[in-house]
Structure formats: structure tokens, C-alpha cells
Image (cartoon, helix red, strand yellow):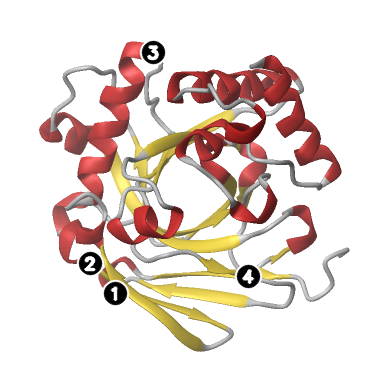
Amino acid sequence: MREAAEKLLLAHEKGEPIAPIIETHPGATVADAYRIQQEQVRVWTSRGDQVKGHKVGLSSPAMQQQMGVNQPDYGHLLAGMFHLEHLPIDAGAFLQPRIEPEIAFVLSGRLSGPGVTAADAIRAVDFVVPALEIVDSRITEWKISIVDTIADNASSGGVVLGSKPTPLSSVDLRLVGCTLRIGGELVATGAGGAVLGSPLNALVWLANTLGPLGIDLEPGHVVLPGSMTRAFPVRPGDAVFADMGPLGGVTAVFAADATT
């Protein structure tokens, strides 16, 4: 599996997608895919990057249908993936970027599974903010299986966080609605309930999935629970705005010149 990790790392560095892992390693399992992901994270952190949280992917029926899979997955969020709202993002830094609106959790307590309950998760959340996740694939033309997306760090690319923190006690995440606009055009609507019934369920799933692997969710970490809509392609010059009602909005702006 080290060869697959090296190929993905090279795809990141050169900006050139590779053939699906499941084609070059047809016997690869989900467990193998997570080992490939972990090897890349080990390399990135050895080079000075830092793990700042995790993401749950494929947690809504819309995303599972779009990607042809039937289960969630997770990936790591590195410090280098975070972008500031309203400041131009270099679209050329990605291979095949798409955008998703999500409700991001920011933790104040540690979550260590297994055995984490919804009550445990609620106590560990400091606040939530609206977020836009830039998903990307190092696999040619997004031809991914569950093994491919997991190996590719759950198709992670970047994160833009909104600036309005909201405590959990003041909002029902299941009922939070979302409108997603690209270039001013309404492209999708969604709701928090599309994410495993509630984004909180995704947080619990993540803590209990990571725990047996010896990984805790740490205070200060950001957790992206999954998209409220399907993902949409973005290009240089696009401005993306997600309005989440009581949670406020979040904007991602992609530089018109990909080389900027």
C-alpha cells in the first residue's frame, strides 16, 4: 500500500491525477485504504503540517448516490487546507474542485470512542459555524470507489469557515436550512437533517469510528459532518455563498486567475 500512498502524494505535488487505486490494486480493502490515507498524513505532518480536525464524507443520501457508495468515510483536515472567508483562493491549487455546504463543529472537549453518545458529543462542542468544504480528487475524472476516496483522504481539498459562532443550545441542527449560490445563481437547497438525520450523528459516528484506532477528537479541532447538498464544480472566478439562516452565511471566492 506504500506504493499507492506515494502515487497519491505525487499527484498532490504535481497536480496530475492518477488511475483509480481499485484498478491498480484490485484487492485493496477499506482497511487498506485507511492505511494509505494515514501514510500520507504521516508524510504531511513530518513536513510541518498539523492535523486540525477531521471530516465525515458521504454522509448524505445525495452524496452517496452521486459517488456511487453506501457508507460514510472520514478524512483528516490539515492546517494547510484552511482558507479565509472572502479572500481569493487559488483554484489552480486543486485538480478537480467541487464545493459543499456544511455545518462545522468546533470542539472544546475531547471525544474518545468507542462508547461516545449524543450527550457526550453535545458537551464537547463549543460552537458551530457555517462552512464550505472544497472537495477534490486525485483520481482521474472522479472515477472513485469507496476505496479510492478513503485512500485519497476522503477527497479532501480545502475548508472555508464562516465567522458567526452559534452555540448548540440555540439551534436545532436538523432543521437548519441551506441555500447554495454560485456566481449569484441558486444551485441547491438542503437541510441539516440530510446529514445522517442530524449532523450531530455524524460527529458521534466519527468519534466512535476513530476511537478503536487510537485517535481522539481534540479540543479546538474542527469537524465537518458532511454536505447538506450534492457537490458542485467550481472554477477560477467563481464566488460561492451558502446561507444557513440562523447560523449565518459563508463565502468562498476563487481567484479569477488560477496562477494568482
Q: Work out how far the residue at label 2 is from the one at label 1, CA to CA, in angstroms.
A: 7 Å
Q: Work out how far the residue at label 2 is from the one at label 3, CA to CA, in angstroms.
A: 32 Å
Q: Whole-percent x and y of residue 50?
A: 62, 28
Task: Identify the residue at image location x=29%, y=74%.
Answer: 245
Q: Whole-percent x and y of residue 257?
A: 84, 72
Mark drawn on residue 234: 4
Q: Whole-percent x and y of residue 209?
A: 31, 24
Mark drawn on residue 213: 3
| Cβ atoms under marks 2 and 1 closer than 8 Å | yes
Q: Secondary structure at mark 3?
A: helix
Q: Residues within 10 Å of mark 2 (few under 14, many from 20)?
A: some
Q: Earlier in the sequence, mark 2 or mark 1?
A: 2
Q: Whole-percent x and y of residue 80?
A: 67, 40
Q: Earlier in the sequence, mark 4 or mark 1?
A: 4
Of the residues shown, which amino acid type is indicated by label 2? Answer: Val
Q: Secondary structure at mark 1?
A: helix
Q: Nearer the viewer, residue 236 or 106?
A: 236
